[in-house]
Image: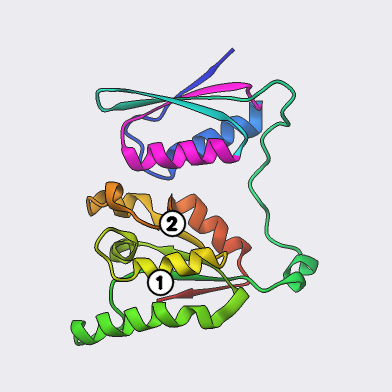
Amino acid sequence: MTNELDCRGLGCPAPVLKIRETLEKEAPAAITVLIDNEAAWQNVCRFLEHQKYTINTEKQGPVFRVVGTRAEGTAAPAKAPSAPTVTERKAGKKIMVMVTSDHMGHGDDGLGDMLMFNFLKTLKEMGPDLWRLVFVNNGVTFTAEGSEAVPILQELAGEGVEILACGACLAYLHLLDKIQIGEVSNMLDIVTGMQLADSVVTI
């Protein structure tokens, strides 16, 4: 039997939250999700893949129909990660940096643009402590086509830094199809990241 969730009209992260609730309660071998916005579609597909489901998608007009199936014998989906224990924290520091704007500080925007670009270039000095870099609001423009920051972010990603860009923000700014680096994300990922991080730096 296939569970079907109608998530039309729901913005991120509501579809992912509904799916997670269903998986935790029922652990279905197959699940179908109806979604009507591209940001939610990308997040739902990524979430189901992380939960070991094979994804098939059909688009009918504005509606995405996502079918996830889990192979027989595959372990049931894992629950959302809990906060790290003291032992886990001692094993390695995790710093999450949130970039909420395309410039730094208040005042002259030209100066702010230069400062933010220099900040991104200097982040590599954090070394392995830099765990996750999250872009929201106008900050997502750094991950999109035409941004001079893309090569910098690609270098960080190559060194193991997780780069996430808010899907709702990308959609609002009409940049979903122009993202060049990082994963399209949602508020559930961001809030979970805050829970797992040893420290969160917001710029």
The residue wearing badge 2 is 182
Q: Which image quadrant is residue 2 in? A: top right
Kindly give the residue lying farthest to the top in the view shown.
Answer: 1
- State the SS at label 2: loop
Q: Quadrant of the N terminus?
A: top right
Please indicate whether residue 179 sits to the left or right of residue 154 in the image.
left
Q: Position of residue 91 (x, y in %)?
A: 76, 70
| Mark 2 burial class by Cα count in 10 Å: few <14, some 14-19, many 20+ | many
Q: Residue at x 41, y 40 (%)?
A: 42
Magenta region: which residues? 27-50
- State the SS at label 1: helix
Q: Which mark is residue 109?
A: none
The mark lying in front, picked from 2 and 1, is 1
Q: Residue at x 63, y 46 (%)?
A: 80
The vertical placement of 180 against 19, above or below, is: below
Please indicate whether residue 94 sits to the left or right of residue 18 in the image.
right
Q: Residue at x 23, y 54 (%)?
A: 173
Q: Quadrant of the C terminus?
A: bottom left
- The verdict on residue 175 being magenta is no
Q: Position of residue 79 (x, y in %)?
A: 67, 42
Q: Residue at x 66, y 35 (%)?
A: 77
Please indicate whether residue 106 sits to the left or right of residue 191 in the image.
left
Q: Is residue 99 visible?
A: no
Comes first in the chain, label 2 or label 1: 1
Amino acid type at image mark 1? Ile
Could you tell me if the residues under marks 2 and 1 are in contact, i.e. CB atoms within 8 Å? no
The vertical placement of 21 against 34, above or below, is: below
The residue wearing badge 1 is 152
Using the numbered discs, state the Cα–Cα distance from disc 2 to disc 1 in whole angstroms. Answer: 12 Å
The vertical placement of 90 against 36, above or below, is: below
Q: Which image quadrant is residue 138 in? A: bottom left
Q: Position of residue 177 (x, y in %)?
A: 28, 46
